[in-house]
Amino acid sequence: MRLYPDVYGRRFAWMLADLVMVAWIYLCVRAGLWVNNLVLQLDALAQGVINAGKTFDSWILSFEQGIPNSVPYLSDFLHRTAAALKVHSGDSLISAGQAGSRGIHLLALILAIIVTSVPLVFAVAIFLPRRLRLIADMRGIHVTLRRALAQPELTPQILEILAGRAIYTLPYNQLLAYSHNPAEDWYLRRFEPLARAELERHGLTVERYFGPRRALSA
């Protein structure tokens, strides 16, 4: 599989684009982790509520364990008070704190995914189709030309196809870099200069298929 063009300028440009894309992916992931860690700092509030509930429970337990059992009336009163306190114990605080902690972790995960995925999907949606199209175009033209050059009788037809693509799709000023008169070359069936233009358009080196390029005279 051909990943990069033969033409050095385009090869450097696409390699740089790939590096920028990798850096962008890294930055998106780092941003998501940063948001995740930032939101998780709110978990300290939930842990504080949980610790308060546990502290309240420990106070009730200490109070109950410290009640004397041999004092008439007073012992019964204190035991009833301890039982009443258990109804309003720290269990509700602990449950609320645990629910809040789970909610904070879920919120941190959701925000991290959003912060990471939204710019990443936007960049990939722009970059990836062009990257895949470049690879597909290079591979398709390369395979077609290799097959054509292996069968010389097909070469004129392949040159005509490439020349037709060039003269109908490339800007005229680009065609002039390969031909003094593109329209005349097409009319006289001199397809090689126009085919070269189409080939280089897709980043393939013309020398690979047609030999060294002849310089245009002034």
Image (cartoon, rainbow, N blue to C red):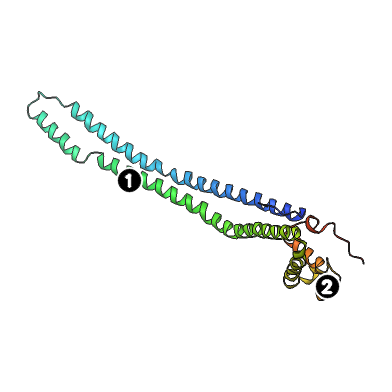
Across and down, in percent, residue 92 comes to: 26, 43
Name the mark on residue 99. Answer: 1
Question: Could you tell me which secondary element the residue under label 1 belongs to?
Answer: helix
- Disc 1 marks which amino acid? Ala
- Specify the amino acid type for callout 2: Asp
Q: Quadrant of the C terminus?
A: bottom right
> Circle 2 is placed at which residue position?
185
Which residue is outermost to the right?
218
The residue under the point 25% across, 32% down is 59
In this orientation, which residue lies closer to the viewer: 21 or 111?
A: 21
Horizontal side of 191 relative to 131 (left or right) equals: right
**Residue drawn at the location 51% of the way across and 48% of the way down:** 32
Q: Residue furthest left?
A: 72
Q: Is residue 32 left or right of residue 195?
A: left
Q: CA distance from mark 1 to mark 2?
A: 77 Å
In the rendered image, residue 10, in percent from the top left (x then y), is placed at 74, 56
Q: From the viewer's perspective, is 51 left or right of 31? A: left
Q: Are marks 1 and 2 in contact (CB under 8 Å)?
A: no
Q: Residues within 10 Å of mark 2 (few under 14, many from 20)?
A: some
Secondary structure under badge 2? Answer: helix
Q: Nearer the viewer, mark 1 or mark 2?
A: 2
- Residue at coordinates 58% horizontally, 56% vertically from top-left? 124
Q: Earlier in the sequence, mark 1 or mark 2?
A: 1
Q: Return the x and y of residue 22 as percentages of the image width and height.
A: 61, 49
Q: Is residue 58 above or below residue 92?
A: above
| Residue 217 screen position, x and y as percent | 92, 65
In this rendering, is residue 12 above or below 83? Answer: below
Q: Nearer the viewer, residue 29 or 39?
A: 29
Q: Quadrant of residue 71?
A: top left
